[in-house]
Structures are given as C-alpha cells and as structure tokens.
Amino acid sequence: MSKIHVRKAKLEDASAISTLFRAKIDVWQRFDAHGRVESPPYEALTIYERWLHGGSWMSIETAVIWLNHLLRGGGLPIVITRDETVVGYGEAYLSHEAEPFGIHVHLGRWHAQTSAVQSALMDYLVALTGDFANRLTVACSVYDDAQSQFFAGLGMSEIGRVRYYDIPAQLGQGFYKATEHTKSNPAQIEGWQMPIGRTQSARYHWEAMFPRLWEAVEGMEAQPIHRLHVSAAGHEALVCVQGQLYDKRKADVFCWSPKSLTPPLLVALRDWAHRAGYRTLHLALDDTNAKLLGADADMLPNQQVIYAINVSSEA
C-alpha cells in the first residue's frame, strides 16, 4: 500500500489543490443575460463566476493569491499526498482568543478524499498543535453527523455553539462612531473574542475578511465588504459587514472585540447598516450574546458546533 505523507504546502501545489476542490463541483453554472441558469464549460466562466462555486480554490489565479497569503503568515496550508499526488488539504490558524478558546490551533477549510487521509491530517495537526498551543479546534454543522462522529472518535468534545439569526437593521438612538478601518495586521485582535460571526475561529475569519486580496478580481464588487472600527459607549470593536450576493438589502456581520456584545454596540451596528442601505442583518451568535436580541429577531434552524481537544507538548 502506498504511503500517505503530510507536509506544509508549497506555492507549486496551488494547481493540485485547486484541482482537488474543483473535483467536488458536478456542474458549473451561471446566469445568462436574461437571468436564466446555463451550464457553460469551465473554461468559459470568468474568474469571479468560478469563485462563486466555492471561493479561492475554484481557479488557479485566485488559488495562487490565497496560497501565497497563507504562506506569508496568514495561516498554515497543509497538503496530504499519496505517491506524490495531492489527495487532501487543510488550513491551520493559530488564534489567541478569550476563553473558552484561549490559545489554540484551528483547522479551517479542509478536504480529504478518504478516512485514512482525514486521520493523517488530524494526526499531523495534533503534533503541530503541541508545538504552538494546548488546544486544537474544528467546526462543523450540527447536522453533519459523519463529521461529528469522526471528531468524537478522536476524543474531541463540544466547546462552543452558535445559532443564526436575522434581525432588522433600524435607526437607533445611541451615540457611536464608525470609521473605515484599513489595518489588517492580526495582532490587533490578539486576546480578543468574536461576539458575532464566529463559526470557525477569530483568526480564520480575520484572514478571510480583512486583507484586501480580491479587489483586482472583476465582479467582486457585487458582494461589498465594509471594514469598520466602531466605538459605541466605550465599546471598541472591529467589524466586517458583507453584503449578500442574492439579496442586496441583507448583510452578514463579523465582529471582533475585547468583550462580549453590548446593547450600545448592537444599536450602533443596526443603525449603521440601515444608513448604509441594508434592511436585514444575518448574525451568528452563541446563546449568551443572543440574549441581547429583541423580539424582532428571527432564529434560523442552522447551528455550527466547535469541537476541541486538549493537546500536550509531548503529543
């Protein structure tokens, strides 16, 4: 049987990783000039149209940009090979957050073709975590029984959970200041928590949202990202508000802050969003922060679970 090998990715791996993720797409589609769905060949799609099927790994152009960003310190890209062929991939992010997460390594986006490849990736991550932190975390949907069972079999247990809510953006009575924030150094959020939008880890979301990597890709402006510094009644926060692609009046919110969500900050976010032209905010919140929502919040059925395992330096 051929041996599985796990290593840090190289820039030369970009094409193979892209191929791995693109193989998951059965049909490539787009809307034609009349708003009808068509299924053109992959080569006929623009970079942005490919992106819509799954993000940066959907074309070699964006794959190289993203892999280069990770290799320059954004995260740790990992490939799993068999007979020198890439058969798996994972992204590890070192995060320093408030408890219950603390200093930990988080497995963000990943893909493995077989259970053996999955196990090899997790074994590598456990050993890696022991060099930098004492906890390894992963995330998955509460409805993904296969992944949940796999993580449980590794000795991982639930450490956090978020539910999704839609709330109306509305003008509010409160004093706050919201300004564009251009600094993308992750040191700004060290030791902070993520009261809104933490479905993976604070560092994972930061690297996906704050660096301006995709402004040269034509079409990306269809889903605008507002990067803000918000100060509301002494509550400082860094916030990303991303407009949704198919509902221009709805936006996803991601928030990094030294403390939990407060009423003044929530009022500020709803007021700013309303003035920016949005009418609905889509939030991911744990149960503690969700208590601040009013009766006009609509709780959605989706939930995301964070699993963790403590790792010793001898692992």
Image: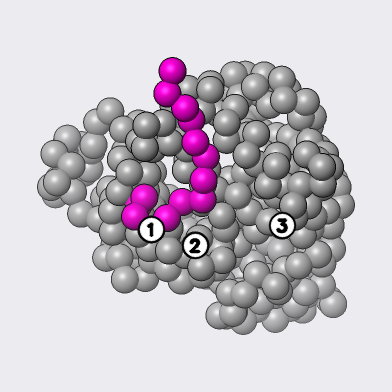
Q: Position of residue 53 (x, y in %)?
A: 34, 42
Q: CA distance from mark 1 to mark 2?
A: 8 Å
The residue that mark 2 highlights is 71
Q: CA distance from mark 2 to mark 3?
A: 16 Å
Amino acid type indicated by mark 3: Ser
Q: Is disc 1 placed on a helix, strand or loop?
A: helix
- Depth check: give the residue in front, 3 or 126: 3
Q: Position of residue 134 (x, y in %)?
A: 82, 47
- Depth check: give the residue in front, 249 or 118: 118
Q: Residue at x 77, y 74 (%)?
A: 236
- Residue 116 against residue 63 in the figure, above or below: above
- Residue 128 against residue 174 in the figure, above or below: above
Q: Is disc 3 placed on a helix, strand or loop?
A: strand
Q: Are marks 1 and 2 in contact (CB under 8 Å)?
A: yes
The residue that mark 1 highlights is 11
Q: Which residues are magenta?
A: 1-14
